[in-house]
């Protein structure tokens, strides 16, 4: 799983968009939740929440971080 950067975990009332190296990510919008050593996630309860400021940036940053780490 060293090349993974994000995951989706569905629940009954929301979906977690998680990041394997979430503690390394900048989060100026305060979206990330979690207390694990590395993992962080965002709880998305509606489709509209996927377009809130910061979500796309976190996905892009997580992808960029993993690409750089694997070089």
Image (spheres, rainbow, N blue to C red):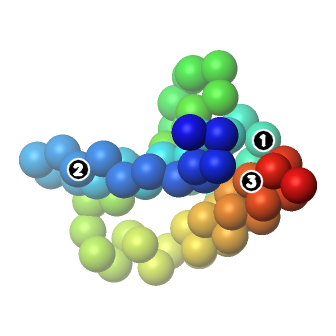
Q: Is residue 58 left or right of residue 7?
A: right
**Nearer to the camera, 62 or 27:** 62
Q: Is residue 32 above or below residue 55?
A: above
Q: Residue at x 65, y 20 (%)?
A: 37
Do callouts 3 and 2 mark residues in contact (Cβ within 8 Å)? Answer: no
Residue under the point 65% across and 29% down: 38
Q: Earlier in the sequence, mark 2 or mark 1?
A: 2
| Label 1 crowd (10 A; few <14 / some 14-19 / many >=20) | some
Earlier-in-chain disc, 1 versus 3? 1
Could you tell me residue 42's position as x and y percent? Answer: 46, 50
Instruction: State the separation of the CA atoms marked 1 and 3.
Output: 11 Å
Q: Residue 66: which numbered mark, if any?
A: 3
Please report the residue visible at 69 percent of the width from the left and 63 percent of the height from the top. 63
Instruction: Describe the element under mark 2 as helix, strand or loop.
Output: strand
Q: Which residue is mark 2?
A: 10
Q: Left or right? Give the position of 12 relative to 54.
A: left
Q: Residue furthest front?
A: 71
Q: Which percent across, then down, holds residue 54?
A: 62, 68
In this rendered view, identify the residue nearer to me: 35 or 3.
3
Label 1 or label 3, whichever lies nearer to me, is 3
Residue 12 visible to the viewer: yes
Look at the image and tell me in which quarter the C terminus lies: bottom right
User: Which residue does the numbered mark 1 point to in the structure image?
Assistant: 24
């Amino acid at each position: 799983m060293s090349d993974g950067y994000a995951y989706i975990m569905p629940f009954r009332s929301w979906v977690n968009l998680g990041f394997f190296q979430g503690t390394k990510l900048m989060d100026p919008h305060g979206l990330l939740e979690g207390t694990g050593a590395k993992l962080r996630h965002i709880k998305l309860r509606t489709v509209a929440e996927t377009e809130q400021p910061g979500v796309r940036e976190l996905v892009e940053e997580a992808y960029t971080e993993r690409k750089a780490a694997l070089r």
